[in-house]
Image: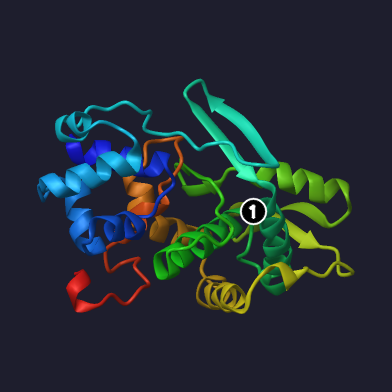
């Protein structure tokens, strides 16, 4: 109970596990044990958490839940949509612009492949975002992904696709991949992505993901996402937690960890 409470407080304050671990003077793997309930807090650590999160020492020790489990806070210049009464989803505009340009880039690079329809694009976006977070502990697009039957679904996708269709940037086609129905998006050949909003590391990571995943079928990518801890640990219809990439198994983990992080 205490570990869950600390986990919720950290998410509420938008702090990474690495950042909190440094505040406590311990390693991130040791801090993960605290959130899992596998390690007790020292009094000094509890006092530091109390100060960091702005709650009483008694609340930390008791594991008293005082914040909702899912709450994505508002930020400046954002698109915000209320999914449920107790869940608020907000997407900063700079993330949406990155999303737009990366989607254009993906469609130019591999949108014409027979296997690449909407479901494959969903998974490409998901692994680009969550793999980058695992590898570098920073967000790339930072999109919100919801747990659905076929895997992670980018929340703002339909709205962005509608905007791009209205502006003549893409064309939507209904087709089949073998016997399976497929929705394809063809990019206007005159449209080029603006990758100046990305740094070299981000571009390199996106190219790496396209290279390793874009030839896989929708069912293969869905199966891979179903093995991933962020999808497994989320409730149906709710957002996936970026921090859960640090609990990944060897089936989906893409980061090489040091021996003391195992």
Depth check: give the residue in front, 51 or 130.
51
Image quarter where the N terminus lies is: top left
- Residue occupied by mark 1: 95
Can residue 140 be seen in the rendering of this structure? yes
Residue that appears at 69% across and 61% down: 103
Depth check: give the residue in front, 164 or 201.
201
Q: Quadrant of residue 158?
A: top right
> What count of labels does the image hold?
1
Q: As drawn, is 13 to the left or to the right of 51?
A: right
Q: Is residue 135 above or below residue 41?
A: below
Q: Is residue 66 above or below residue 5?
A: above
Depth check: give the residue in front, 38 or 153.
38
Q: As drawn, is 121 to the left or to the right of 68?
A: right
Residue that appears at 64% across and 34% down: 80
Extreme residue in the top direction = 85
Q: Position of residue 134 (x, y in %)?
A: 40, 65
Q: Position of residue 88 (x, y in %)?
A: 53, 31
Image quarter where the C terminus lies is: bottom left
Residue that appears at 34% across and 53% down: 244
Q: Position of residue 69 (x, y in %)?
A: 36, 32
Q: Quadrant of residue 52?
A: top left
Residue that appears at 50% across and 76% down: 212
Q: Position of residue 230 (x, y in %)?
A: 37, 51
Q: Secondary structure at mark 1?
A: helix
């Amino acid at each position: 109970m205490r570990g869950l409470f600390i986990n919720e407080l950290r998410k509420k304050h938008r702090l990474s596990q690495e950042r909190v671990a440094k505040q406590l003077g311990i390693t991130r793997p040791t801090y993960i044990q605290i959130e899992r309930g596998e390690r007790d807090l020292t009094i000094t650590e509890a006092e530091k958490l109390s100060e960091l999160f702005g709650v009483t020492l008694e609340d930390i020790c008791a594991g008293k839940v005082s914040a909702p489990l899912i709450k994505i806070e508002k930020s400046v210049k954002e698109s915000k949509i209320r999914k449920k009464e107790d869940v608020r989803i907000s997407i900063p505009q700079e993330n949406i612009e990155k999303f737009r340009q990366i989607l254009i880039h993906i469609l130019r690079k591999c949108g014409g492949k027979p296997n690449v329809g909407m479901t494959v694009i969903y998974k490409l976006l998901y692994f680009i975002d969550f793999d980058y977070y695992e590898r570098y502990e920073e967000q790339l697009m930072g999109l919100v992904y919801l747990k659905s039957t076929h895997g992670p679904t980018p929340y703002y996708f339909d709205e962005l696709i509608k905007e791009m269709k209205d502006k003549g940037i893409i064309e939507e086609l209904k087709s089949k991949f073998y016997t399976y129905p497929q929705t394809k998006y063809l990019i206007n050949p005159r449209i080029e992505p603006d990758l100046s909003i990305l740094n070299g590391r981000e571009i390199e990571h996106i190219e790496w993901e396209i290279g390793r995943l874009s030839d896989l079928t929708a069912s293969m990518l869905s199966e891979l996402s179903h093995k991933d801890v962020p999808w497994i640990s989320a409730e149906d219809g709710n957002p996936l937690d970026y921090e859960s990439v640090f609990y990944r198994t060897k089936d989906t983990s893409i980061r090489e960890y040091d021996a003391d992080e195992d």
